Image (cartoon, coloured by chain):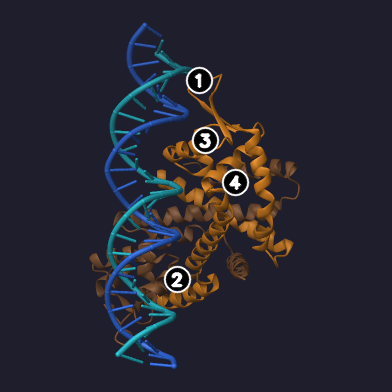
Chain colours: A brown, B orange, C cyan, D blue
Amino acid sequence: MTRLTACIDMMDEGIGRVKAVVPELPAADVVLTRLLLMVSGCLQEEVERKLKPYKLNDSDFRTLVILFSRADGSSTPGELCDFTAQGATNMTRITNALVKRGLITRGTSAEDRRRVVIRITPDGRRFVRKMLPPMFPRVSAAYIGFSDADKRNLDRLLRKVAVNLDQLNADVQS
Amino acid sequence: MTRLTACIDMMDEGIGRVKAVVPELPAADVVLTRLLLMVSGCLQEEVERKLKPYKLNDSDFRTLVILFSRADGSSTPGELCDFTAQGATNMTRITNALVKRGLITRGTSAEDRRRVVIRITPDGRRFVRKMLPPMFPRVSAAYIGFSDADKRNLDRLLRKVAVNLDQLNADVQS
DNA sequence: AGCGCATATTTCACCAGTGAAATAAAACGA
DNA sequence: TCGTTTTATTTCACTGGTGAAATATGCGCT
């Protein structure tokens, strides 16, 4: 696998050449977008690599961790679809897989019996508690050399992008 | 689709609860990572949405744009695999698709006849020139409200993360 | 009681990408 | 010249995810 920095260098040169041909190109914005996509692609690989030995993919694990992080340890398929940005079809597959492994249970809600209630099991909680700590060092390694101000800044700017993207998506509807 | 900001709020609460149970969690770093992944997932969707009407996916288009951006308009499969982070299998599929549409040609190198040379065609160049400008407004929209300093900062911090990730991946080998 | 709506599941056909193995061609080096 | 290595392609089985349509269930309203 080629280094990320080599790809970035290559992009910087490429953008320059494209800009020469298409002058209206907003080079800075395009570079920021490509940087975001490259970096997060690499982070994604990093996460998947950690999960692979446990035969879990990121979607499965994220779903489980969301349940872990809820006050009552439960949620519904629809809600999980929203939070994980998955379709219903895939959510069904994910819950099937997690139920089969005994990490969650699937039951029906008492109040609204259309509703399926998904709940993390004690086994599921144990699993998450065991999985998380070994991931921490490599997560933190991505931000080595960042001052507190750097982290605050990156946090702030990413949240700002998120707001803009929500705005953009809201406009699409109208 | 749920708004990104709603997902972020939900994550902030969830992280707080997880931290209460797993105190060694590097909350700030995990939040930064999740923000990066969420934001770039959304950017990715944005790009794909633009490309969909042309029956192209991001990998195909990125490959084409890389060729467009090269000084001589050509490259080789291996090089493109590196730059696009694709496997050889998939690169073969991509080039097949682009050749079929007449956007690139596939030939053999004169110097090293093992080597396949992929070159963008005049049609390919026209296509890219036509595709790019309509994408600009929506790319730039992601950075509305950013000062020049904000953009410089985001650029700098993302490149810093990239360097760290390269370091991390280099360590894996050793 | 009955209609409309929301929620979830299943099925099906599909797209995108992976990983491993087999094949081929040609450069390169002893 | 012969073996090794590099580069690319193809095939195969597989994973992960999408989108649409059909089905079922049950809430809430009139």
Which badge, 4 or 2, comes first in the chain's sequence? Answer: 4
Q: Which residue is mark 1?
A: B113
Residue B57 placement (x, y as % from top left)? 52, 49
Question: From the viewer's perspective, is B86 left or right of B136?
Answer: left
**Label whose residue precedes the other's in the sequence (3 or 1):** 3
Q: Is disc 4 in contact with disc 2, using a CB cutoff of under 8 Å? A: no
What amino acid type is highlighted by mark number 2?
A: Phe
Is residue B145 placed above or below B87 in the rendered structure? Answer: below
Where does label 2 land, which residue? A83
Q: Chain of mark 4?
A: A
Taking A168 as reference, is B59 left or right?
left
Which residue does the numbered mark 3 point to in the structure image?
B100
Q: How far apart in space, not on screen, are marks 3 and 1 (Cα)?
A: 23 Å
Amino acid of disc 1? Arg
Q: Is B103 situated above or below D29? A: above
Whole-angstrom CA distance, mark 4 to mark 2, is 31 Å
Give the Cα distance between marks 4 and 1. 29 Å
Question: For numbered disc 2, what is the local secondary structure?
Answer: helix
The three-letter amino acid code for the residue at tag 3 is Lys
Q: Does dot 3 land on a helix, a strand or a loop?
A: helix
Q: Residue B94: image x %, image y %?
A: 49, 40
Q: Quadrant of residue A74?
A: bottom left
Report which residue position mark 4 lands on: A8
Residue drawn at x 55%, y 50% is B163
The residues bearing labels 2 and 1 have C-alpha atoms spaced at a distance of 51 Å
**Which quadrant: the C terminus of chain B?**
top left
